[in-house]
Image: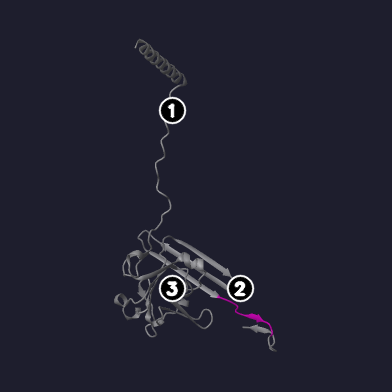
Amino acid sequence: MKKRLIIALLLAASALVAGVQAGNAAAAAGPTPAPSAKPAPSASPAVRRLDTEIVTAQRHAGTIGSTSRVTWVVTAADILRLGAASVADALRFVPGVTVKNTGVSGSLQTVALRGTKSEQTLVLVDGRPINDPDTGAVDFSSIPVNGISRIEVVSGGASTLYGSSAIGGVINIITARPTATASSAFVQVGYEGAVDEGISASATDPSSLGLRVDARMTHARNAFDFPGFGGLPAGTRT
């Protein structure tokens, strides 16, 4: 019993000596620096939209996910990426859209939805109808694409909201809003003398009034040389 007591006292004494030595070493080394605080989490600078906002499907602001109507949105970035020269060219990639060209490039372009006639497709600009009162059609070749913010296409009958002109659906062209006083111009040169040029200008004031003007023109020499074939001489198509 005495032997066990002596061993315990020795162990306690050695632990006490080790603690004193550690304290002396810490005092000689100086105060221990406080641990640096971890940086607080910050919000990501990138804003990600969870759902696309639309106004055409229900005639009031909403999202595609909250409506039961089939709705497609073509943004200004999509138009630029596709290289579309007209609204009709941009709509060619939307399911259920039929584009009809009457004549060469720059002539009449009409659009129809889901197999209906162009007269049965309602076309809006910022929510206001632009269908011709006599023919009911719209010439899409006369609408410049550089002043468009987005195009909303509601495929399928929408007569309960828009009347008999919307049997095939609704195409709503939403123009870009003036956000600052600025101006820009562009010129693109293509094959065989094709030239695409346009200007954009916008102005605002402190009273929240704004004005935006966009103009675009596309033209080409439209003359091509062709080789002789089947006894016909070579020449130039003008």
- Please, which colouring scheme is shown? one colour
Give the Cα separation between the discs numbered 1 and 2: 71 Å
Name the chief secondary structure element in magenta.
loop
Q: Nearer the viewer, mark 1 or mark 3?
A: 3
The residue carrying pointer 3 sits among few (fewer than 14), some (14 to 19) or many (20 or more) residues within 10 Å by Cα, namely: few
Give the Cα separation between the discs numbered 1 and 3: 66 Å
Task: Give the mark nearest the N terminus, 1 or 3.
Answer: 1
Q: Amino acid at mark 2?
A: Tyr
Q: Which label belongs to residue 191?
A: 2
x%, y% of residue 159?
A: 31, 78
Taking the image as shown, residue 79 lies to the left or right of residue 164, namely right
x%, y% of residue 70?
A: 37, 71
| Residue under pointer 1 | 33
Q: Residue at x 41, y 56 (%)?
A: 48
Circle 1/circle 3 CB separation < 8 Å = no
The residue carrying pointer 1 sits among few (fewer than 14), some (14 to 19) or many (20 or more) residues within 10 Å by Cα, namely: few
State whether residue 23 is above or below residue 198: above
Res 148 → quadrant: bottom left
| Residue under pointer 3 | 95
Looking at the figure, which quarter contains the N terminus? top left
Q: Amino acid at mark 3?
A: Pro
Q: Amino acid at mark 1?
A: Pro
Q: Residue at x 61, y 73 (%)?
A: 191
x%, y% of residue 5?
A: 35, 12
Task: Give the mark nearest the N terminus, 3 or 2.
Answer: 3
Q: Which label belongs to residue 80?
A: none
Circle 3/circle 2 CB separation < 8 Å = no
Residue range corresponding to the magenta coloring: 219-228
Numbered disc 2: secondary structure: helix
Let me know if residue 107 is in the magenta part: no
Taking the image as shown, residue 101 lies to the left or right of residue 231, namely left
